[in-house]
Amino acid sequence: MLKHATHIVWDWNGTLFHDIDAVVEASNASCAEVGLAPLTLERYRELYRVPVRGFYEHLLGRSPSDAEWAALNVSFHRHYRRLAASCGLAEGAADLLAARRAAGGTQSLCSLAPHADLVPLVTAHGIAGHFVRMDGASDLTGAAKAAQLARHLDAMDGMDPRRAVVIGDALDDAAAAAHVGARAVLYSGGSHSRASLRSAGVPVVDTLAEAVAVADRVSA
């Protein structure tokens, strides 16, 4: 019998992977190409949203054309890939993942990062073996995570969502969890301000260690 009945579904960007500064820098670089002023970290956290096209719509003050959206998206990922090379895991992430696996708990990774980028990056940081499954996005559309999370859980022999807790840094993580009938814990070290995260009505924490402890508690 598993010591931990809770299955944790981890988010990657802004959660396990501490890349928020790279994300903001890449966003500013892509926005500069269409004449937008740079954002501070605080302002980015206030404005960021998923689907990502809505984020740019807010910045532009209008809906971007398909051509503008495609150019912004490609530009962001080009700059981000360069900057991500210097980013590391969030504090304590590697030890938490290893300890949970050693204790018999299961965990997986579901991210909106492109799958082709995600798996090599996770592997390079030496933590791929801690996950029973890893799924990134199949395209660069920046769509919401709900449908992807549903596919992710179904692919694990139809795992019961009631056993799963999503740990992420965005309101979209909580929305995706609610969509499939799972629970969520939101971490304040990533893409959203703490005030924004609280609006989701789920637990908000400031460390990943606390996120794991709360995940076990809310699913008990």
Image: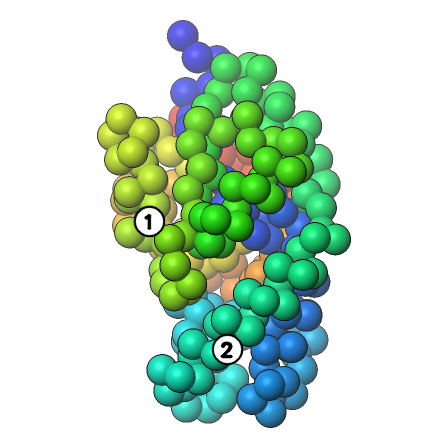
Q: In the figure, is residue 17 to the left or right of 56? A: right
Question: Residue 140, located in which quarter of the rendered image?
Answer: bottom left
Q: Position of residue 163 (x, y in %)?
A: 35, 29
**Residue sitting at 33 percent across and 49 percent down?**
148
Q: Position of residue 67 (x, y in %)?
A: 40, 84
Name the amino acid type tagged 2: Leu
For residue 195, which quarter of the picture?
A: bottom right
- The image quarter in which residue 130 lies: top right
Amino acid type shown at disc 1: Gln
**Which residue corresponds to the image point at 67% horizontal and 61% vertical from the top-left?**
82
Left or right, 141 with respect to 36, comes to: left
Q: CA gap, disc 2 to disc 1?
A: 23 Å
* Residue 168, placed above or below residue 108: below
Q: Secondary structure at mark 2?
A: helix
Q: Is residue 191 above or below residue 129?
A: below
Quadrant of the image containing the C terminus: top left
Q: Which mark is residue 72?
A: 2
For marks 2 and 1 on the same chain, the one whose residue lies earlier in the sequence: 2
